[in-house]
Amino acid sequence: MLSVHSFTFNPFQENTYIIANEHNDCWIIDPGMSDGNEENELVNFIQSKNLKPQAIINTHAHIDHILGIDFLVKKYNIPFYLHEKEYPILMNAGNTARMFGFQFDGVKASPVSINEHKALKLGEDELEVRFVPGHSPGSVAFYFKTGSWVISGDALFAGSIGRTDLPMGNYETLISSIKNNLLNLPGETRVYSGHGPSTSIEIETNSNPFLQ
């Protein structure tokens, strides 16, 4: 059974997640650490739980979700997974950083492609990959049926949805993605978003003003 641990990093208040199994193998999702203190917070947690990082998996490649990738790749010698439709977003990270007023040289690690038709396996546990473009062109969500939760990235938030005014975003595509690939999950499914508090599929189905 996979457990979920969350951290909030960088000026964008991005949620980074660690998911771990009973053998202490773990994946790091959307590492957004932006300075040494945040890197230490994540590493200290990993050490305190005796976790063994196996990979980085990203829901998408916007700047706030990728700041810690190279640090983790170097420290743990682990691969970095991303949907190939996000590669243009990843390659433009330096320009995006300048747009937001800070310096970032981009991610040097080469991504391994995530396929939405192929589940990701951590030991005996399996994450279903759900394709949810709109906020960005290759956004994916990670659904763990056994634990009844989904990590939605920036597609779906508590009471809101991802912005679509960034390059390659599309509002109609995002609404369609949410309705067809997230809201069709069981109502009790816990939603862990890229920003803000967790929610549930039932709550968002019934009350999210963008989805009524």
Image (tube, rainbow, N blue to C red):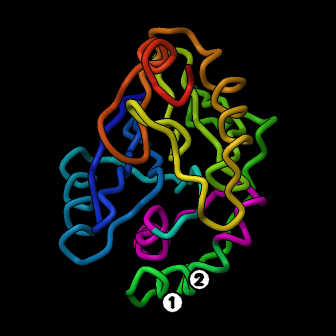
Occupied quadrant, residue 1? top left
Residue behind mark 1: 105
Q: Is residue 5 left or right of residue 167?
A: left
Residue behind mark 2: 108
**Mark 2 or 1: the one toward you:** 1
On screen, 100 above or below 121? below
Please name the predominant secondary structure of the magenta segment in the image. Answer: helix
* Residue found 35% across the figure and 50% down from its top: 15
Q: Is residue 112 left or right of residue 163?
A: right
Pick the residue in front: 39 or 179: 179
Residue 63 point in image, percent of width and height: 49, 70
* Residue found 40% across the figure and 37% down from its top: 20
2 and 1 marks in contact (CB < 8 Å): yes
Q: Residues within 10 Å of mark 2 (few under 14, many from 20)?
A: few
Q: Which residues are magenta?
A: 64-89
The amino acid type of the residue labelled 1 equals Asp
Pick the residue in front: 167 or 72: 167
